[in-house]
Each structure stands twice: as structure tokens, then as C-alpha cells.
Image: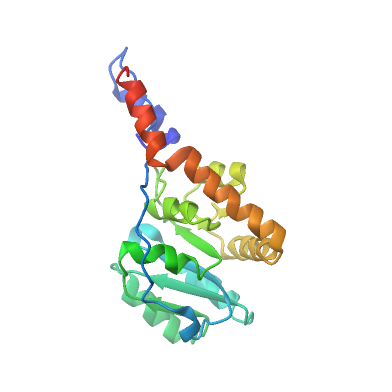
């Protein structure tokens, strides 16, 4: 399984004597291609941008980040970029238009090889999981953020393993109350860190180190070989 928090459930479903262990998801080296999205050519130019790249569906619970964008609209140095598709994407985009949010940009899905160049234009990655989730889940996009040295602003279900991981490794800020007030406080705290060159560099370095320690292909291979008695 991919998350320690699910061990308890699967242990109860497994016959006595059977060994269960956590095998974290992993991510290989991605190609580096020029990104078709250039933020300098958009109304987010010059802003510190929170980026979300991936599916925008019911399971993500993205509305709270639209609420956050509205809260932070007075700050002309902050923006939000949502890249991808999903059942909620069009509705969320219409909602930003209805609220006249000038700090939000929606873009269509891009090729995976363009992701590193996209993240290089941003300051933090968004992780969103609907609070109704009952299991532990570490989304694949979290791995891409870590690989690119991008700290995270997360809103996830209470007790998710990501909460402990983000706080323990100090790689961003995480909210598990689904409160826009709390999310705003955490976003501002993260922005304060990103405003300080030394703090920002250390934060980015911790993200990359966590990726190498937990999510690199080499680590997964070593664990699988050991489990098979190699």
C-alpha cells in the first residue's frame, strides 16, 4: 500500500502471518520541455503564484481555493493558476468570473514534460482533497511538487498522512479543518517564508531532499528487491 495510515485497515483484512508493508508511490525523471504557458504574458505576471496542475473533480474539493483567492484578491503580488481539466473545472472557472477575481487564471491541460518549466514560474503547489475522504491518500501531484522543489499549500481530510508528513518535513503548510480562515492564515505564513531568500531556498531544498528520500524510483526499487529477498 502507498500510505502508512492504511496499514491498520489492511492488517485486519489479511491472514495471520502475511507481511504487509508500505511502498510509497514513486516518480521517475521527467523530460524537460518548454512550457506552453508563459505567466509573463498573462495578468499574473510578476506575482507569487500558487499552482494546481491536475484533475479538478468532486474528489478534490477545489472551491475552498477559489474562496482563498477571493480573500487574497487585495494583494496584487499573489496569484492562483489552475491547469487541467475535470468535472468541476468549468464550474470553478465560471465562479471566478462571477466573483470578478482578477488574481486567478485557468489553463487547459499541458503535456507532462512541460510541468517542470511550469513549476519554475510558480512559488508553491496546491494540494486539494475533499474533507469527506476517509482514507489516506498522497496525490501524484504532490510528488511532482517535491521533485521540482515546490513547497505546498494543502487542504486535505482530517488525519490524512499528508498532514504529518508536511509538518514533520517542514515543506509547506497544511489545513485539515476545511476552514478558509485557517487556510488564509497558513497561506500568508507560507508567503512570508517565500519572501525571505534564505528561508525560501531552505524550503525548496527540503522538498527536493524529501523526494529523493521517499519517492525516487531508486528507493522503490531497493525496497522491492529487499522484500523479494534480494
Whole-percent x, y for residue 121 in the image: 50, 71
Residue 82, by quadrant, is bottom left
Nearer to me, 99 or 18: 18
* Residue 69 percent location from the top left of the image: 54, 74
Q: Residue at x 48, y 45 (%)?
A: 211
Residue 157 in the image: above or below residue 99: above
The colour scheme of the drawn protein is rainbow
**Residue 151 picture quarter:** bottom right
- Residue 166: percent from left, percent from top: 56, 47
Residue 149 x/y as whole percent: 53, 55
For residue 114, above or below residue 226: below
Q: Residue furthest top?
A: 17
- In the picture, the quarter occupied by the N terminus is top left
Is residue 161 left or right of 47 when viewed as pictured?
left
Depicted 74 relative to depicted 54: above or below:
below
* Up-down relation of residue 41 to residue 91 (above or below): below
Q: In front: 140, or 161?
A: 140
Amino acid at each position: 500500500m502507498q500510505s502508512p495510515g492504511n496499514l491498520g485497515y489492511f492488517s485486519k483484512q489479511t491472514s495471520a502471518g502475511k507481511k504487509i508493508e508500505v511502498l510509497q508511490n514513486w516518480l521517475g525523471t521527467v523530460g524537460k520541455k518548454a512550457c506552453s504557458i508563459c505567466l509573463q504574458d498573462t495578468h499574473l505576471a510578476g506575482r507569487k503564484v500558487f499552482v494546481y496542475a491536475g484533475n479538478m473533480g468532486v474528489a478534490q474539493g477545489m472551491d475552498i481555493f477559489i474562496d482563498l483567492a477571493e480573500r487574497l484578491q487585495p494583494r496584487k503580488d499573489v496569484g492562483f493558476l489552475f491547469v487541467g481539466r475535470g468535472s468541476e473545472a468549468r464550474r470553478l472557472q465560471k465562479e471566478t468570473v462571477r466573483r470578478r477575481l482578477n488574481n486567478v487564471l485557468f489553463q487547459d491541460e499541458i503535456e507532462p514534460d512541460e510541468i517542470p518549466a511550469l513549476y519554475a514560474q510558480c512559488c508553491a503547489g496546491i494540494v486539494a482533497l475533499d474533507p469527506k475522504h476517509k482514507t489516506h491518500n498522497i496525490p501524484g501531484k504532490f510528488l511532482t511538487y517535491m521533485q521540482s522543489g515546490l513547497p505546498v499549500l494543502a487542504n486535505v481530510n482530517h488525519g490524512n498522512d499528508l498532514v504529518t508528513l508536511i509538518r514533520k518535513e517542514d515543506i509547506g503548510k497544511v489545513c485539515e479543518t476545511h476552514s478558509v480562515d485557517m487556510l488564509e492564515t497558513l497561506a500568508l505564513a507560507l508567503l512570508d517564508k517565500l519572501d525571505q531568500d534564505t528561508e525560501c531556498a531552505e524550503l525548496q531544498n527540503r522538498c527536493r531532499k524529501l523526494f529523493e528520500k521517499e519517492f525516487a524510483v531508486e528507493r522503490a526499487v531497493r525496497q522491492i528487491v529487499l522484500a523479494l529477498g534480494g
